[in-house]
Image (spheres, coloured by chain):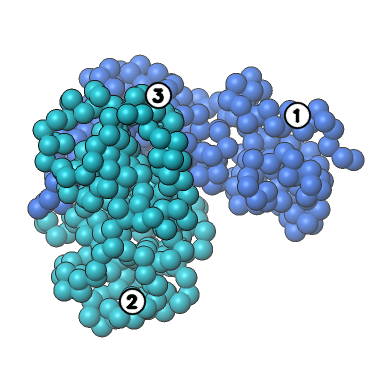
Chain colours: A blue, B cyan
Amino acid sequence: MPLSTQQIKFIKALMQKKQRQENKLFVAEGPKVVGDFMRQRFPIQSLYATATYISENENLLKTQTFPVTEISEKELDRISTLTTPNKVLALCHIPEYEINEQEILNRWSLALDGINDPGNMGTIIRMAHWFNIRYAFCSPDCVEAYNPKTVQAAMGSLAAVKVIYTPMDALLNRMAGKIPIFGTFLNGQNCYDVDAGKNGLLVFGSEAHGISPKVASCIDRRISIPPAEGQIPPDSLNAAVSCGIILAEWHRRNRL
Amino acid sequence: MPLSTQQIKFIKALMQKKQRQENKLFVAEGPKVVGDFMRQRFPIQSLYATATYISENENLLKTQTFPVTEISEKELDRISTLTTPNKVLALCHIPEYEINEQEILNRWSLALDGINDPGNMGTIIRMAHWFNIRYAFCSPDCVEAYNPKTVQAAMGSLAAVKVIYTPMDALLNRMAGKIPIFGTFLNGQNCYDVDAGKNGLLVFGSEAHGISPKVASCIDRRISIPPAEGQIPPDSLNAAVSCGIILAEWHRRNRL
């Protein structure tokens, strides 16, 4: 049965943040992302796929409980946001996570203050997954993690990292004294000279404005990534790159 | 004197790669990028700026030899590619660098194989500058470094890092045996267990396809960034993030 005009309209409307938030749904596309979501039991509401995809993924689909609709390539073209639509599209529930304070106290988590580039946000979620970070707290002015660009850049990692939007200063005030709070600044202590244990919150600000003053006042340890000497370095590093360098360094120390 | 229709047309045409390559010119915008280019003596052909910018930057402009045209905000709107045009736009010469083999033999350089995201390319150029890398060799299928998105993401760092497009396998064959050639792979040696000296070429492939087979065969040392244990990690890290982690690690060792 072909997709109804109403179904097509509904799926396409989810390209808008307002519609995603009202319906608590977002769109994920392509065998990689959708496959990862299924394997990791991320809450999928419904799935639209070509006959080829359905026959190639029979075993994986058999274990799922949501409805699967077979659609033509042409129909996929109509509902896809990708330049090259790719076999499968899923509507997924936007998860609402509880903050498990005990889990946070024993490990490193990210706190993102005003990150507004969708690609950067997806890259950060993916690398958080790489380094086994479970929580990425986001200030309400961060870009929404369920927009199509971020979902694609994060690949399947939205199923592994809990992204929680929450007022950043309230979160940090709540955690203050219970766990070290580190933040990256241009004039902080050299990150290679800083002691970092097995747990903490790592705050990253937007590239344009850095960490906001209200959030900065909650930070215990200001750290920096040192540029190479013998030159005038650029003003800053990309936020996702800074985050990757710090996470890799913490991980290196803990494995040594 | 207001901008002529022909001037406007010429500047706007430089949004197209073909036009940039024919004219050997590209567009840089905003006080940050244009200011860095002037301070670093990057070859500017001509500059268009608002009266405010010209009066605020009198001393800097006085030291330059290219023509400066005062334009209105409205004219800037017409020629700008930015959502929020920002005071100044410069036409810059696309530099043609010679490869100074001696300079390459004594330091680390980047070799980018098929990096095709403009933002990633700009981020990589900026971080190369941060870590005092002088050369970024790019395979001909890399995204062109002078497109507006890359220029803005690189900020002023295009003036500090020599970006050279050249067939990658020919370059690596030429450098083989003279300098160690490292490449990042999914199944390489743990980068923290690898000896890396003061010089080498560091090859990064595209995220979709990795390092191409022809280039891979020229690589001496295959390295990887280890993911955290206790989980199924994502398939890969973003190319710019991988590059940042390795450059930071080499830099950390050399400063210790």
Q: According to the image, label 2 marks what residue?
A: B172
Q: Which mark is residue B74?
A: 3
* Residue B181 x/y as whole percent: 30, 73
Residue B240 seen from this side: no
A144 up-or-down from B243: above or below = above
Question: Foreground residue, B227 or A154?
Answer: A154
Q: Position of residue A213 (x, y in %)?
A: 25, 19
Name the chain letter of the residue that bears numbered label 2: B
Q: What is the chain identity of the residue bearing mark 1?
A: A
Label 1 – label 3 distance at C-alpha: 38 Å
Q: Tell which of B58 and A44 is nearer to you.
A: B58
Q: Where is A148 relative to B98, above or below?
A: above
Chain identity of mark 3: B
Relative horizontal placement of residue B214, taking residue A199 as reference (left or right): right
Q: Amino acid at mark 2?
A: Leu
Q: Mark 1, residues whose alpha carbon is within 10 Å: few (<14), some, or many (≥20)?
A: few
Residue at 39% in and 28% down: B75
Task: Please state which of residues B15 and A177 is positioned toward the viewer in this rendering.
Answer: B15
Which quadrant is the N terminus of chain A positioned in?
Answer: top right
What amino acid type should be assigned to the residue bearing mark 3? Lys
Residue reaching furthest to the right:
A1
Q: In the structure shown, which secondary structural element does the residue marked by tag 2 occupy?
A: helix
Q: Look at the numbered discs 3 and 2 and tell me whether their residues touch, using CB distance below 8 Å.
A: no
Q: Residue at x 24, y 56 (%)?
A: B161
What residue is rendered at 14% in x and 46% in y? Answer: A232
Q: Find the distance from the CA under tag 3 to the CA under tag 2.
A: 49 Å
- Residue that carries the numbered disc 1 in the rendered image: A9
